[in-house]
Amino acid sequence: MKLYYSPGACSLSPHIVLREAGVSFEIEKVDLRTKKTESGKDFTAISPKGYVPTLQLDDGSILTEGPAIVQYIADKAPQAKLAPANGTMERYRLQEWLNFISTELHKGFSPLFNPAYPEDAKKIVRDNLAKRFDYLRATLEKGPFLMGEQFTVADAYLFTVANWAGFVKLDLAPFPWVQAHQGRVAARPNVQAALKAEGLLK
């Protein structure tokens, strides 16, 4: 498998999951501005959507969208326990978390990366994100992870998205439960390895 990624983008989530799963994979960086891969290929010819993450499977087919990719990887390595078994209520709870992170947090951050977005509108966006982070309190204070004691693909996704706060002037200090979760996930050796591979840690 090959993961096309951009450093620190939402593709960091499946990158972490690939390492946690212990499967064989390659990574290739994508310049999202020029749509060129590190080896000089036209990324839109590989993935017409033109954004990461994109996972090229061993048969050459392409899978996109982070929540789908991380579940695919988890199901390839059930021994890693990165996702509950398909068909169980716990799996639907995992999908509930992945959808929440995708729609309420991930997309919620998008306007803050847009320099053309008015500052007064960005304040509304930050206030909305604050409400979403506040919602996590009841779960993460029980912790240590979103699904309880077991680290799952949802934790990799939340870690990736919450990590953007530092780039968009969103203070996580009022949400110590999020900060604690970030610390627990960041301490995992496979997370450290993914961050280093993407040039995000020295």
Image: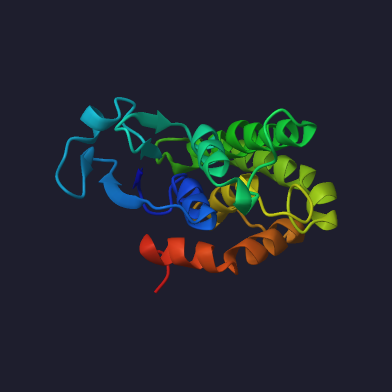
Instruction: Give the x, y percent position of residue 11.
Output: 44, 45
Image quarter (top left, top right, bottom left or bottom right) of the N terminus:
top left
Q: Nearer the viewer, residue 156 or 79?
A: 79
Residue, x 67% and y 31% (percent of image)?
A: 86
Residue, x 33% and y 29% (percent of image)?
A: 61
Instruction: Give the x, y percent position of residue 53.
Output: 41, 39
Name the quadrant containing residue 67.
top right
Residue, x 47% and y 32% (percent of image)?
A: 65
Image quarter (top left, top right, bottom left or bottom right) of the C terminus:
bottom left
Q: Is residue 188 above or below residue 6?
A: below
Judged left or right of residue 12, residue 89 is right
Instruction: Give the x, y percent position of residue 99.
Output: 64, 31
Whether residue 117 is visible: yes
Name the quadrant containing residue 125.
top right
Judged left or right of residue 63, residue 188 is right
Total labels: the figure holds 0
Residue, x 28% and y 45% (percent of image)?
A: 30
